Each structure stands twice: as structure tokens, then as C-alpha cells.
Amino acid sequence: MTVNVGARSASSQPGSTTAGTVEFRGVTKSFPTADGAHLVLRDISLTIPPRHIVALIGASGSGKSTLLRLAAGLGEGPTTGEATIDRTPVQPYDSRCGVAFQEARLLPWRSVFENVSLGLPRSLDKDAGKARVRELLELVGLSEFTDHRPREISGGMAQRTSLARALARDPEVLLLDEPFGALDALTRLRMHDLLLDIHAASPTTVLFVTHDVDEALKLADTVLVLGKEERNGETIPGATVIDVVEPKEARPRSTTSDEFGELRHRLLDRLGVELSSEA
């Protein structure tokens, strides 16, 4: 399946000078095992336009994080095919990308300010770098915690610090691997609002992995479902894009709307979740 997302981009507002176009062309990815190569991703052809927010969902082991890592240049590249940003091949640890994970991965001996500073590009002079960090800490609501160590802040604050660090280089593409998965429900909702506020202020291209269908529908312009296809009663090895959902409702979206409910049911069905007739 070839997917060109964003025919009706909900986040096409002007103002971003750094948003990039992400493309996967005929990408497959396999890993060696004792029994031979294990195919994780198969025939991924996908274009994500600038400033678009795309969510990747799928069952555990469907290759969501693998695809995101290919976009970031983390680890070895595709087995076949190509991943590009603005038609230029993704490089190892590509500097055009900012990445945040489920774990904040902060250095415990450094302050919040210093941890965010680690994300700055080396080409930025010292004064400009400090100004950039202060701006980001203000944006994520941590300007009063600049000197705190990770052990002195909450999990939500740590994740906000991680997000600010990912944004420090003003990336063309922001890649998030289940960034809110370890947070409590209330903090997660606040982080949803924060991500949308950040995107409104600096609308970069966003690709994020989640297991939460509601989270995907609330935040994304497009939701992509990764999974394995069946043909003639047999499961084809390797995950690919098996469904594409583009909510029509503008953000912020109501989780109680008819469209939201219909799309939730559709996605859960694609994920193999059985729903009662009363659901």
C-alpha cells in the first residue's frame, strides 16, 4: 500500500520554517535470528507532508517503533527501500530529527536546564543556545525549575524536559515513541494539550507511536494502522500499513462525538479488539 497522507491537512498553517517531508519508499526491515531473517516491516511506502501530525498504532511487535527509528536514523537503515527527509536520505542519528521516548532518559547529575541544552545543535553560539533553552522551558512550563535535578521533579515534568530537549535543535521532524505511556491519566491529558500548544507555536512534522487509540484520534491529523495482511487464508510475514484514518473534526476533538466513536470502533476492530454490541 502506498500512502500519501495529508490531502486535507488540519495543521497546514504557515509559520514553520523547519518542517520536513518524511518519505518511506518501498521500505522493508528484517533482523537476523538463529532461524534466519525475521521480517518486521514489509513494503512501506508512505509520504508525510510538512507540519502534519501522524500517529502510528498497531499490536505489540507490529514494527511501530522500528519504523520510527528508521525515520530518525537510529540503528541500521532499511533492509530494502529508502527513508528520506525532504528527499534526502536519512543519516545515522539524523540531526534534522528530534526524538523523545517513553522514558525521559535525563542525565541525573545535570539540571533541567543542562539536560535541555544537550539537544542544542553544536553550531549554535552559547548566548543563542541559552536563549533557546529559556524559551523552550517557558513553553513547556518549567521556567521555575531550571536548576532542579531529575530526582527533584515529577514524571510529567521529566517528560516535559525530554520534549523540550527534543525541540532544542528546532527539528524538521519530531519523533515520539510512546512519549506519554508511562504517565498517569491526568498528566497524560495535560501532555496532550502541551503537545498541541507546541505544535501550534512551532508546527513541525510529527510522527508518534502510541497504543492508545483515543490518544491517536485526539492528536493526529492522520492515524496509520500497522499490521499483517492475510491472503488466501494465510498471514503474510511482515507488517505494513493496513488502514488509514483521517478525522474530519478539527482539534480540539470531543471524545464523545459521533465521528470519534465511529473511528474508535473502526481502529479497535482493525487491532483485533472485540467490542460488544452495546459498546
Image: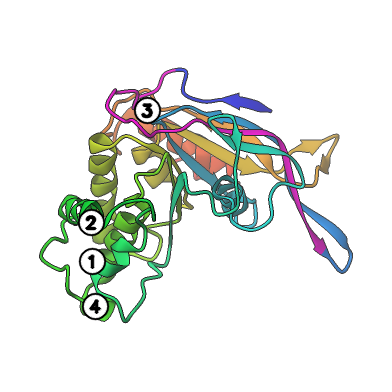
**Whole-Å distance between the Cαs marked 1 and 3?**
42 Å
Residue appearing at x 28%, y 53% in the figure = 125
Quadrant location of residue 122?
Answer: bottom left
Mark yes or no: residue 279 visible: no
On the rendered structure, is 142 left or right of 171?
left
Where is residue 131 drawn, in percent x and y? 18, 53
Foreground: disc 4 or disc 1: 1
Please tell me whether mark 3 sits on a helix, a strand or a loop: helix
Q: Amino acid under label 1? A: Phe
Residue for badge 2? 133
The magenta-colored residue range is 8-32
Q: Which mark is residue 259?
A: 3
On the rendered structure, is 226 left or right of 110?
right
Residue for badge 1? 113
Q: Earlier in the sequence, mark 2 or mark 1?
A: 1
Q: Which of marks 3 and 2 is nearer the N terminus?
A: 2
Classed neighbour count for the residue bearing mark 3: other residues with Cα under 10 Å, few (<14), some (14–19), many (≥20): some
Q: Which of marks 2 and 4 is nearer the N terminus?
A: 2
Judging depth in this view, the residue of 43 and 258 nearest the camera is: 43
- In the image, residue 24 lies in the stretch drawn in magenta: yes
Foreground: disc 3 or disc 2: 2
Please tell me whether mark 1 sits on a helix, a strand or a loop: helix
Please tell me whether mark 4 sits on a helix, a strand or a loop: loop
**Whole-Å distance between the Cαs marked 4 and 3?**
43 Å
Q: Which of marks 1 and 3 is nearer the N terminus?
A: 1
Foreground: disc 2 or disc 4: 2
Q: Which of marks 4 and 3 is nearer the N terminus?
A: 4
Quadrant location of residue 181?
Answer: bottom left
